Amino acid sequence: MVQEIKVGIGDYAVGKGRGIISTYGLGSCVGITLYDRVTKVGGLLHALLPEASRYGGRGNPAKYVDTGLQLLLKDVLKLGASKFRLEAKLFGGAHMFDNVKSADLMIGQKNVEVAKRELKRLGIRLVAEDTGGKGGRTIYLDLSTGKVRMRKVSGGKVIEKVY
């Protein structure tokens, strides 16, 4: 039986070789996976808000894209990943509320923008993404392959893809 590690909001997990790391309920939140194909080391972050400095920075650093990504990177490197081989995949960042029109309140869009900016700053390649839209997503990172299975519910339809 394959072990599954479930990651909650404002949390992350890393692993090596075997197992699944999953997260449920990515609405405006983003899920970022990092994976090294050679060492089979990977991890997943479920971030709620874009930047710690903009939102007070108190409490758990994993709830912010910028500081959470730093934690995730540090821990995959500890398990033997090479920063130069890491591949990132990005999910979520949906616009969940039709009545929100202000760009400042479009947290999903900001989460995606900050994730892309931070990955670029860290020199980590973004190889796949499924972001935006209105639906919630669930993602499953397979540590044996680096593939991410995504399940999205949007407009009453269930869409499944593998990245």
Image (cartoon, helix red, strand yellow):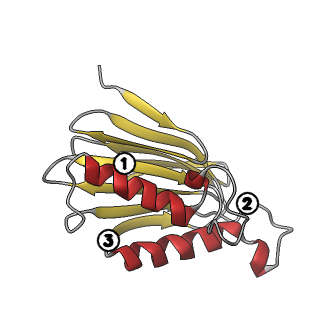
Res 74 → quadrant? bottom left
The residue positioned 55% from the left and 70% from the top of the image is: 112
**Residue at image mark 2:** 96
Q: Earlier in the sequence, mark 2 or mark 1?
A: 1
Across and down, in percent, residue 129 comes to 43, 66
Residue 148 showing in the rendered view: no
Instruction: Return the residue found at the far left.
Output: 38
Across and down, in percent, residue 87 comes to 28, 63
**Compared with residue 86, is residue 44 higher up or lower down, i.e. above or below?**
above
Residue 74 showing in the rendered view: yes
Q: Earlier in the sequence, mark 1 or mark 3?
A: 1
**Residue at image mark 3:** 124
The residue positioned 48% from the left and 34% from the top of the image is: 6
Q: Give the residue type at disc 3.
A: Ile
Across and down, in percent, residue 37 comes to 18, 54
116 and 130: which one is in front? 116
**Compared with residue 161, is residue 70 higher up or lower down, i.e. above or below?**
below
